[in-house]
Image: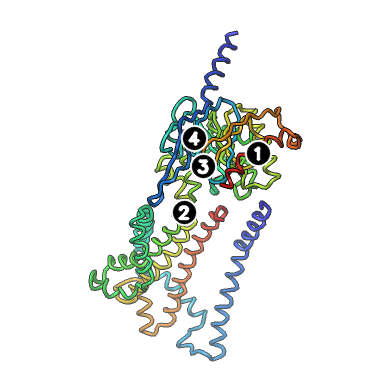
Amino acid sequence: MTDAAAETGIRRQRVGGAGGLVTWAVALAVLFGTWQATLALGLMQPELLPPVGDVLATAFDLVRRPSFLGHVGVTLAEISVAFVIAVPLGVLLGIAISESPYWSQVLKPIVFLIFSIPKTIFLPMFILAFGITFGQKVGFGVFSTIFIVLISSFSALESIKSDHVRVARAYGATRSQIAWRVYLPSMAPILLEAVRLAMIFNLTGILLAEMYASRAGLGQLIANWGENFMLKELLAGILLISTAAILFNEAVRWFERKCEHWRT
Amino acid sequence: MAEDKTNTKLRVVSSLAGAVAVRGLGHTYNTSGRVTQALADIELDIKPGRFVVIVGPSGCGKSSLLMMMTGLVAPTSGTILCGGQPMTAPDPDRVGVVFQEASLYPWLTAQDNVEFPLSLRGIPKSERAARARDKLALVGLTGFEDRYPHELSGGMKQRVSIARGLVQNPPILMLDEPFAALDEQTRISMGDELLRIWEETGKTVIFVTHSLTEAAYLADEIIVMSARPGRIIDRIEVDLPRPRTYAMMATPRFAELRERIWNQIKTQASE
């Protein structure tokens, strides 16, 4: 059993390290290659699909434009505030609900039901209620994110082994010690996964809200560029946002891998 | 001469600390309106330093009895005294516990796991580390301090669990079927390990098992329990010489012991 565990560990590490970079390089090569090939073969007009070089040049130009960076700042602020509210709130609420047998029975099914509803249909209501403001977008971001955090917290709590809690009790741990020394580390792997998923939902929600109705922000830029046929900027924007999202995701996954060794 | 007196005094004091008594213990529980009696009329008087094994059919309540003796569960009637004081809550300074599943924390190394009870008390790192390493050496795991549980075999995990139970130097160690999840060969070697540790430390050991062989091999005294409601139906003094050896298992005396236990239990199991 020890040998098998060691073997799997080694295999996992190899794929994670050098394998990751190679996958990256291949993915980019395929993407840009197909892109250029489509143009070269005349399958798409350059007005609708500018060449890779042009788009990359525009991207480099954009990140130095103060007006663009201003919009980035707005979106970043909205995302951060919504994230910092939704994740801790979701985890604490998730724990509170799970710890009460009564509220568990009542609220868990409701959470799952609401989770299955696409949040975008509530956007007009948010605008009617809160106007087109920073707060409205943050609110919508929290609304989009909190359900996945709740559901992940339920799952994280269920993953806590009662044996682990019993050991802590046998050695005289107080309730707060059990919460910090047993609950939290047990929940860490699933909660990290929740952080990753939460950001995806968060980013999607906020960009959508910005695209729908906003005075500032990346989503508003994207919508604008699209409406005005500014393809180079549009594709550059897409590339930049995609890169940022992927980098965040990979950072969390790297962190998750460090916790992986105890998650059987 | 004065030194001798102090030593004797210490030994007497420490030996009182290792005494375990159970008086008039009974336990009933309620499930959806039905009242079930799990344990009845349990009386035990365990002298310090003895190795006592509790054996009985499945479901007889032996594990529940042990959980009550560790203070994790409160019986509905009766008292448990460890070192002359009632056990109303877990007290790792008096009783160290080893469970069937080693239940090591997978996010901690072997040494951190052994240090865990001490870290709950706020004992500084350097002292914790020294005591943990000392106990890991006692269980024969020097060199494995920085391994994580998933890198350890079942037997090694149980040894870490035993080290953890010993780290606060309680006079009493209670083990709930600790070798049940191990393969036969590991069970035999772990049994010898436990006897060695017991002989080195002189603690009172209370060991629950369903294995007749383990009971006869390890114990000074075997407590045989009936099926539910669990009662004590036999107390057997094991007169096999120590140190116990594997060869003893082939002797007629060993077979007699096993048969005596089995005769009691099989009438219970069939009821």
Instruction: Identify the residue shown where x is 24% and y is 69%.
Output: A130
Label 3, secondary structure: give it: loop
Q: Quadrant of residue B132?
A: top right
Q: Quadrant of residue B8?
A: top right
Query: How far, Cα to Cα, is label 3 from label 1?
Result: 18 Å
Label 2, secondary structure: give it: helix
Query: How far, Cα to Cα, is label 2 from label 1?
Result: 38 Å
User: In this rendering, does residue B137 appear at all?
Assistant: no
Amino acid type, mark 3: Gly
Is A82 located above or below residue B147 in the figure? below
Chain name for mark 2 = A
Spot occupied by residue A18 in the image (x, y as percentages of width and height): 62, 63
- Residue position for label 2: A187
- Residue position for label 3: B61
Spot occupied by residue B252 in the image (x, y as percentages of width and height): 75, 34
Query: How far, Cα to Cα, is label 2 from label 4?
Result: 31 Å
Residue B214 tag number: 1
Left or right: A125, with B49 as reference point: left
- Residue position for label 4: B69
Q: Nearer the viewer, residue B206 or B92?
A: B206
> Of tags 3 and 1, which is closer to the observer?
3
Query: How far, Cα to Cα, is label 3 from label 4?
Result: 12 Å
Is B184 located above or below residue A121 in the figure? above
Spot occupied by residue B81 in the image (x, y as percentages of width and height): 47, 28
Chain name for mark 1 = B
Left or right: A237, with B9 as reference point: left
Q: Are marks 3 and 1 in contact (CB under 8 Å)?
A: no
Label 4, secondary structure: give it: helix
Instruction: Identify the residue shown where x is 45% and y is 37%.
Output: B26
